[in-house]
Image: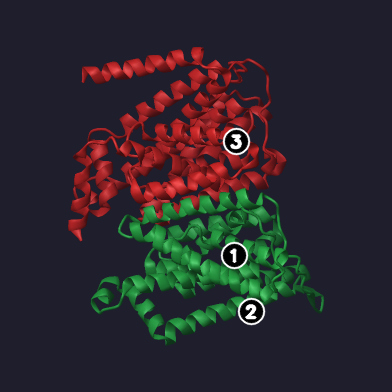
Chain colours: A red, B green
Amino acid sequence: MKAQAAGYALGLAALVVLPFLLPDYFLHIAIQVLIWSGIYTAWAFMGRFGLVSIGHGAFMGVGAYTSALLWNYYGLTPWLGIPLGALGAALLALAIGFACFHMRIVGHYFALVTLALGQVVALVIIAARDVTGGSLGMTPRAVGHSWYALQFPERRYFYFLALVLWLIVLAIRYWASHGMRRAAAEAIGEDETAAAAVGINVMREKLRLTVVSAAVTAVGGSIYTQYLNYLNPETVAGVGVSLQIVFAAIAGGMYSALGPSVGALLTLALTEGLRILFGVHFIGAANTIYGLLLILFIIFMPRGIMGLFERRRTARAQPQAAAAD
Amino acid sequence: MDIFLLEAVLDGIMLGGLLALLALGLNLIFGVIDVVWICYAELVMVGMYAIYWLHVYYGWPFLLAGLAAILLVAVLGVLLHRVIIEPILGSPPINQLLATGGLLFFLQSFATLLFGTDFRNVGIRLPIIELGQIDLSFSRLLAFIAALLGAAGLYFFLAKTYLGTAIRAISQDREVMGLMGVDERRIYLTTSAIGGGLAGLSSCLLVLQYDVHPFLGLTFGPIVFMICVLGGLGNMIGGVIAAFVMSQIISIGGYYTSVELSDVLAFVLFIVMIVLRPKGILGR
């Protein structure tokens, strides 16, 4: 146990020193890895308990556009805009989650509902082109270095912002799913009726996971926008991002705390590596390989990369499920 | 009634036929194999590219190119089942959906890699029929008729042939059919071939109306899913009804508002409907 704690402390220290050693380009990559890690981890809040959403772009889009629009049109500081965006995403998740869970919509039906939700948000953003700039996207008004506007030309600020965000997301993951809560969520993921029979409030547990996941994803979307200082429906909403989130989280391993973060590291390294290797001539190359890997992962390693390091304790779930039929 | 509104309604009916054909293939796969091919629209895109290259580049006659595309996509369907679905047939349904999601990514990006993001058109311009004051595009009418013929063909196949009966039986009770000596695997592969073939047929009809580009699947793929779910996944008749309902919403909604907002309307209606009637409009 002591060795483990020391390991974590050492890792954290390395992450704090890292931005002072990295060249600018790698710092840029590191920031993106941290932000996406937060988002993928948030997706896995739900995913690992069988609530697979293929429309998380909806929540990211709501968060990113809320804070950016409030800043551009009303000059409202992102310090308020981001929580408002998260609130919006949480309410959306609450409405959809309540409706779906109330009607016992699970599995791929639930996935398809979230897919539709993602489409609705992306299309609304495109349709409201007078306000949002439509498919061309928009640029939050730049004011240079400012804590009030949460804009920093100096990358290191964003690095620490992203690092703090990531640590908070990991803490939330721990809070939302340890002890009895984890046991309850796992029971629901395996058999809802049985879980309800032993006195678990299925609706409340599922809503908690969904709402927290949506709110955190929205914050991630906002921070990502603040960093890039640009957003469009393709990059923060839409089917593409939603599937990217699913893929990265699964590839890294959605059942482990650091799995989705490993997924973020892997996918960004892959994208950047291919970009450097092939240049811009092969625009489809990275996603072609993503697609192939996603298929291979689902078939051969559904628990992702981190699944390789898991202890045997989780293996018991499968024979039980088979025997239940 | 406003003449343009009437035109929108007619357009909607034509679109409905096409969407119904797309939904039929997907519904067949779902009903029989219990798998959602989320990459279905991408298979259609592959067919459209095949027709484009064979017809425009190699100068094959359109009908021959279309036939080749149907065959090609049917083979793709079989491969999809054999290579991707079969190894994970026993895992949770969501895994199968995600694996075909990977194929969606792959096909889309591979098309970008091979053909770039250009919009390509087969360059066949069919005449426009004038019915009084209403303009009706011949290619849409053709697509509508072909879609109905395809649906009728599928119906007779399922209702009248031995293989069709076996397919229907297996969709009703998987375990018993195995005991009755039906070779499940053969049925699944046949169904995948038919599902792929229907996607190929759709690509012949779509290529007459739309340009081909790698992201084509994203524009109508989600709508086709909504239709299948709305009709009740696996329920063919429900799917056909839902196709016409959705196409009218898109067409009439587009007449009153904008293209995007009519899609938003369709998706919102889908969410509301699925929550109210999770088993589809004809569900019990």
A125 is higher (above) or lower (below) than A78:
below
Q: Nearer the viewer, residue B48 or A143?
A: B48
**Neighbours of disc 1 within 10 Å: few (<14), some (14-19), many (20+):** many
- Label 1 SS: helix
Which numbered disc, 3 or 1, marks the residue closer to the eye?
Answer: 1
- Label 3 SS: helix
Residue named by callout 3: A65
Which numbered disc, 2 or 3, marks the residue closer to the eye?
Answer: 2
Residue B75 x/y as whole percent: 49, 68
Q: Nearer the viewer, residue A274 or A70?
A: A274
Instruction: Name the chain under label 3.
Output: A
The residue under label 2 is which amino acid type?
Ile
Specify the label residue B145 is tagged with.
Answer: 2
The residue under label 1 is which amino acid type?
Gly
**Neighbours of disc 3 within 10 Å: few (<14), some (14-19), many (20+):** many
Residue B240 x/y as whole percent: 53, 73
Residue named by callout 1: B47
Quadrant that contains the C terminus of chain A: bottom left
Instruction: Name the chain under label 2.
Output: B
Residue B233 x/y as whole percent: 43, 66
